[in-house]
Image: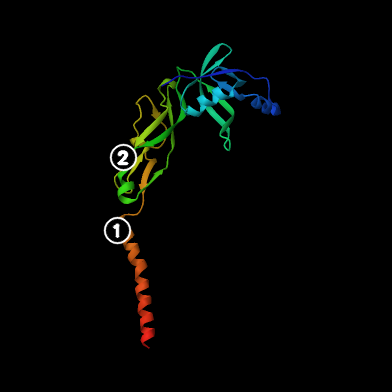
Amino acid sequence: MEKAVIEATRRTVTGKQVGALRRAGKLPGVIYGYKFEPTPIEMDFREASYVLHHATQSQIITIKLDGKEFAALVRERQKNYIRNEFLHIDFQVVSLTEKIRTKVSIELVGVSPAVKDFNGVVVHETTEIEVEGMPGDLPEKITVDISGLTTLGQSISVGELNVSDKIEVLQDSDEVVVVITGSAPEEVEEAAEVVEEPEVIERGKKEEEEEE
């Protein structure tokens, strides 16, 4: 895992003046947490945005402030979604020697044969799970291979995820992560027969009327 580092300085600008800070190429934020008083900070917008766009919720980011380094998690990202730009970031300082709780995103990989063979649809129901563990043991993300889902209705639950034994998953093991949905071929054929039947009856009525 590549070390993610963001350099920051203490911020004195607050309130409505923060807009001018952003126009000057700075990204405002706040850092708080383990043995750390809440402190407003500012970062270089371009450099911080690059790191934040690639960082996950469970990735430790090193914040350099006042000549010291602090291990932190991103707890909140305020964004302008139209311009895809960060507006404000909340960092939580964590202890590298104590367990923490956070959420880890789930990424689907592979191709389910049921999609090609039975026109199935992949439904990603759980996109992240809450876990607890030492900061250094937290995975950036959890990958789930769906190539083993060969028939409609097959699913993968939280309990089936490949997670390190150093991490405790805090969600229900029966919770569905991904499922393949759709109609089986025989169901489609039966539906087609039901639709065709009224058309045959209607034609028969018209023929009887013509004979009269």
Q: Is residue 66 left or right of residue 154?
A: right
Q: Please, what is the three-letter code of the amino acid marked with disc 1? A: Glu
SS for dot 2: loop
- What amino acid does circle 2 point to? Ser
Residue ID at (70%, 29%): 16
What residue did someone put label 1 on?
A: 186
Viewer-side residue, 30 vs 51 = 51
Look at 52% across and 16% down and name the residue there. Answer: 70
Foreground pick, 143 / 24: 24
Q: CA distance from mark 1 to mark 2?
A: 24 Å
Q: State whether residue 196 is above or below residue 210.
A: above
Please give the name of the residue rendered at 34% of the width and 38% of the height, measured from the top-left corner: 110
131 vs 189, left or right, is right
Q: Secondary structure at mark 1?
A: helix
- Residue bearing the label numbered 2: 147
Q: Position of residue 86 (x, y in %)?
A: 57, 30
> What x and y, as percent, mark residue 136?
42, 20
Quadrant assignment for the C terminus: bottom left
Q: Vertically, is 90 above or below 68? A: below
Within 10 Å of disc 2 (Cα), the crowding (few <14, some 14-19, many 20+) is some
211, above or below 138, in the image? below
Nearer to the camera, 125 or 169: 125
In terms of image quadrants, where is residue 155? top left
Q: Residue furthest top?
A: 67
Where residue 91 sits, quadrant-wise, is top right
Callout 1–callout 2 Cβ contact below 8 Å: no
Label whose residue precedes the other's in the sequence (1 or 2)? 2
